[in-house]
Image (tube, rainbow, N blue to C red):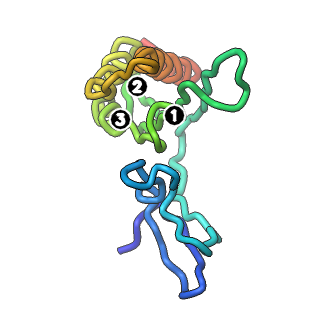
Amino acid sequence: MRPRRQCEHHRTSGERRVAFSDFHRLPGDTPERDTNLEPGELITSIDLPAWSSGLHSTYRKVRDRASYAFALVSVAAALKVEGGIVREIRLALGGVAHKPWRASVAENFLRGKAATADNFAAAAAAELAPAIPRRHNGFKIELAKRTITLVLSELAADEGAMR
């Protein structure tokens, strides 16, 4: 069975497929490598699942006023609310870890719950509960929580679904 999201790579020894969740690397023993691309490989295609009908999406990048390149925190969100209840959600964070962070804890927390700012905040808190603040980046945890809550609240309000 093929993974739903994957990148197709071409290399001199042939083609290989990598699930998107396995594409980016954690630093480990090779902090200079951000991806699992091997020398000579080239990304030739990316397969994405079909978009669900009624899913509204947005992207928010929070950055330092002096920097126009790097996000302190970014949130990509897609939300479908029916009858005030979260039916579908996709949530990912950037700028808070070495690789893009799929917020599956928050997604699972919100499915089937009321689309409220309180629930969005609780989901963000659950997602970031295991985060370990470091001396110079601890502020990002609260910034990420607030950005998740704001983005999801805006999406729900755009749908007229906020309670």
| Residue at (32% x, 33% y) in the render | 111
23 versus 26 height, above or below: below
Residue 126 is situated, as x and y percent measured from the top left of the image, at: 28, 24
Residue 108 is situated, as x and y percent measured from the top left of the image, at: 29, 36
* Amino acid identity at mark 3: Glu
Q: Callout 2: helix, strand or loop?
A: loop
The quadrant of the picture occupied by the N terminus is bottom left
Residue 153 is situated, as x and y percent measured from the top left of the image, at: 49, 18
Comparing marks 1 and 2, which lies closer to the viewer?
A: 1
**Alpha-carbon neighbours of circle 2 within 10 Å: few (<14), some, or many (≥20)?**
few
Q: Which mark is residue 107?
A: 3
* Amino acid identity at mark 2: Gly
* Amino acid identity at mark 1: Ala
Residue 135 is situated, as x and y percent measured from the top left of the image, at: 40, 18
| Callouts 1 and 2 close, C-beta under 8 Å | no
Could you tell me how far apart the alpha carbons at marks 2 and 3 are, in whole angstroms?
Answer: 18 Å
| Residue at (38% x, 54% y) in the render | 29
| Callouts 2 and 3 close, C-beta under 8 Å | no
Q: What residue is pinned by disc 2?
A: 83
Q: What residue is pinned by disc 1?
A: 77
**Alpha-carbon neighbours of circle 3 within 10 Å: few (<14), some, or many (≥20)?**
many
Looking at the image, which is closer to me, 133 or 62? 133
Residue 100 in view of the camera: yes
| Residue at (48% x, 73% y) in the render | 17
The quadrant of the picture occupied by the C terminus is top left
Residue 161 in view of the camera: no
Q: Callout 1: helix, strand or loop?
A: strand
| Residue at (47% x, 44% y) in the render | 99
